[in-house]
Image (cartoon, rainbow, N blue to C red):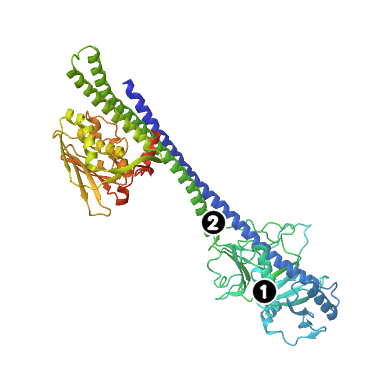
């Protein structure tokens, strides 16, 4: 009972550690997956917030550029508008601004009195007043809206679409400067702002050049907040929405913005109450920087404005023609399809890296299991080897000891008995020498090179010497040897000692596993079907045979069939492995055919020596050892 506990505990420990490590890896994989999802959600929120901030900054900078231009054109009082002074201000602004060509024309508009007719005069580019008999055709929508709504010193009143009739906060901050109220007709486009800063109802209509907006202002703002179009993560466009086909005002991509209703991550109106619409359900308006006094689309009042977060000096309310909303919108799309797609791709990349690391750890666990099992197998092989060698050594040693005791005790009384006992000692000593040589030769095979003495050998002489060396074993085991050597076989070039050891191992193996038939056949023949010609040396028996599944293992060092291990036949498991290596070292190879219960035949195939080699004398050469099974060779080195 006590002797069986330790193997059970050892086996339990051997499997418990890998199972524990596997559970840890699975837990890490689950945590890694959850962590990647949380990181993706955080990255998505961060990218959406950053995108909203960039869009709002684009909008605010656009308003700042237009408001700065309008402030440069305003006069100090409303008593009169001097055309030359206005022309001078326009020229000064064009000289100092990077958008010098943005202004096309500047007009003056005012209501003469309550019953009079509105007055429209062209102020620039001509440096004098020029009363317009008719409004320009592109101003028709703005003209009708102005007449129906009217301007006062308080600004534009009436229904001006989504930007008109706005609800002011009940308690605006006093320290914040109220913006100047203006308007923009985005169809033209034209800005409508007070002509002076004194509060009189005299207004300037500033017509803008779309080409300058498209080629200079919008590209500058896009590059400032979204990066260089060639390397930016986003595609940016400014479109005029509301019609069946969007009006493209600006785009960083060749086709982006043509369909503003699909495939975008976010859209923001450039004038009026800011409202961001995101392409993902997680978006919200919480991070928007809005102007004071506006209400959200749902009607809830927005928070009071903070410094530098609202409009810049002038608030441009959009003018709409009836119910047709043609507001300019900034639309943005991630180059990878969408923000969600970019985040998903980032998550997949992180998951690949993470699970790649986990796979490396799993491979490490597998290596630990493999090495532990390999170490156990090596330990078992080592113990079997020691047990086999010990048994093989014990038999000749016991025989030599018994014979020597008989001689010492005086049992041997005549010369005939002495010669018989001396022959017995000689045979047992040869068996002992053969076993020691096998172990030493196997150890020598593990070196990268081994020195062999190559000379011309006659196969008949080699077979005769091997049979003589093993005669005592053959006779003692009761075997009959049938020798069949073809006459006039050509010579081969080989190391006589190594090749004889190879054949001797095969004969010894046949004696051990020859079964009840007690027959061994040793044949040598010439085969000319290959080039060069081959000499085949075959050792055959009518023994127990070898199963097909075991044939691929019999040449492995220390391998012994489970059936053989259970039998009383002992061995080291090195005989066939050495025979195979010896045959390959001599330039040949070893094959086997076997059927269980019928017997086995091992054949050494050796190339015939060439004429020049047959005439050569004894030479020392370095022959590289061929290892068919490198894994098992490494195992034997550990032994």
For this view, does 399 lie left or right of residue 40?
left
Q: Residue at x 60, y 54 (%)?
A: 46
Say which mark, if any, is on residue 343. Answer: 2
Q: Position of residue 345 (x, y in %)?
A: 51, 57
Crowding near the residue tagged with mark 2, few <14, some 14–19, many ≥20 C-alpha atoms within 10 Å: many
Relative height, residue 216 to residue 567 (above, below) = below
Residue 22, visible in the rendered structure:
no
Crowding near the residue tagged with mark 1, few <14, some 14–19, many ≥20 C-alpha atoms within 10 Å: few
Q: Nearer the viewer, residue 472 or 95?
A: 472
Q: Position of residue 517 (x, y in %)?
A: 13, 35
Q: Position of residue 150 (x, y in %)?
A: 73, 75
Say which mark, if any, is on residue 483. Answer: none
For this view, does 145 lie left or right of residue 567?
right
- Circle 1 residue: 215
- Residue 282 figure quarter: bottom right
- Residue 138 figure quarter: bottom right
């Amino acid at each position: 009972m006590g002797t069986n506990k330790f193997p059970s505990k050892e086996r339990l420990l051997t499997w418990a550690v890998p199972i524990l490590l596997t559970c840890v890896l699975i837990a890490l994989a689950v945590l890694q997956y959850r962590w990647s999802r949380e990181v993706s959600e955080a990255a998505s929120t961060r990218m959406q917030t950053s995108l909203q901030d960039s869009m709002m900054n684009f909008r605010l900078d656009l308003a700042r550029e237009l408001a700065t231009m309008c402030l440069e054109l305003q006069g100090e009082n409303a008593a009169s508008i001097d055309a030359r002074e206005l022309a001078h201000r326009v020229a000064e602004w064009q000289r100092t601004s990077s958008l010098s060509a943005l202004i096309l024309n500047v007009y003056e508009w005012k209501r003469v009195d309550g019953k009079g007719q509105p007055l429209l005069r062209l102020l620039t580019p001509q440096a004098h007043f020029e009363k317009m008999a008719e409004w320009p055709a592109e101003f028709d929508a703005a003209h009708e809206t102005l007449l129906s709504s009217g301007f006062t010193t308080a600004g534009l009143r009436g229904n001006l679409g989504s930007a008109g009739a706005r609800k002011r906060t009940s308690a605006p901050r006093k320290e914040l400067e109220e913006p100047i109220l203006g308007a923009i007709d985005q169809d033209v486009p034209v800005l409508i702002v007070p002509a002076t800063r004194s509060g009189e109802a005299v207004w300037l209509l500033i017509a803008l050049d779309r080409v300058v907006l498209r080629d200079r202002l919008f590209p500058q703002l896009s590059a400032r907040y979204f990066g260089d179009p060639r390397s930016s993560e986003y595609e940016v466009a400014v479109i005029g929405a509301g019609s069946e086909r969007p009006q493209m005002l600006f785009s960083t991509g060749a086709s982006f913005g043509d369909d503003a209703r699909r495939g975008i991550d976010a859209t923001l109106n450039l004038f009026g109450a800011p409202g961001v619409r995101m392409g993902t359900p997680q978006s919200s308006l919480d991070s928007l920087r809005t102007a004071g006094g506006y209400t959200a689309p749902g009607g809830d009042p927005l928070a009071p404005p903070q410094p530098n977060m609202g409009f810049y000096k002038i608030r441009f309310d959009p003018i709409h023609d009836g119910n047709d909303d043609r507001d300019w919108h900034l639309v943005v799309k991630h180059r990878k399809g969408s923000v969600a797609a970019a985040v998903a791709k980032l998550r997949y990349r992180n998951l690949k890296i993470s699970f790649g690391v986990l796979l490396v750890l799993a491979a490490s666990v597998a290596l630990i299991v493999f090495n532990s099992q390999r170490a156990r197998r090596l330990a078992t092989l080592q113990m079997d080897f020691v047990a086999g060698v010990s048994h093989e050594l014990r038999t000749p040693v016991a025989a030599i000891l018994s014979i020597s005791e008989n001689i010492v005790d005086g049992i041997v009384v005549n010369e005939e008995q002495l010669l018989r006992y001396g022959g017995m000692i000689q045979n047992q000593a040869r068996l002992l020498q053969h076993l020691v040589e096998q172990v030493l030769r196997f150890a020598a095979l593990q070196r990268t090179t081994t020195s062999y003495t190559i000379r011309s050998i006659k196969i008949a002489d080699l077979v005769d010497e091997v049979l003589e060396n093993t005669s005592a074993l053959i006779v003692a085991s009761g075997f009959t040897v049938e020798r069949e050597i073809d006459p006039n076989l050509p010579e081969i070039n080989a190391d006589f000692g190594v090749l004889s050891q190879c054949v001797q191992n095969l004969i010894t193996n046949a004696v051990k596993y020859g079964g009840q038939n007690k027959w061994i056949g040793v044949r040598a023949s010439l085969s000319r079907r290959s080039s060069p010609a081959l000499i085949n040396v075959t050792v055959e028996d009518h023994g127990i045979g070898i199963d097909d599944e075991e044939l691929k293992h019999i040449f492995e060092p220390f391998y012994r069939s489970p059936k053989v291990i259970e039998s009383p036949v002992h061995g080291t498991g090195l005989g066939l492995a050495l025979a195979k290596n010896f045959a390959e070292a001599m330039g040949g190879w070893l094959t086997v055919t076997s059927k269980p219960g019928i017997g086995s035949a091992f054949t050494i195939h050796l190339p015939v020596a060439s004429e020049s080699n047959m005439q050569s004398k004894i030479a020392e050469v370095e022959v590289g050892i061929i290892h068919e099974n490198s894994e098992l060779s490494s195992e034997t080195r550990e032994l």
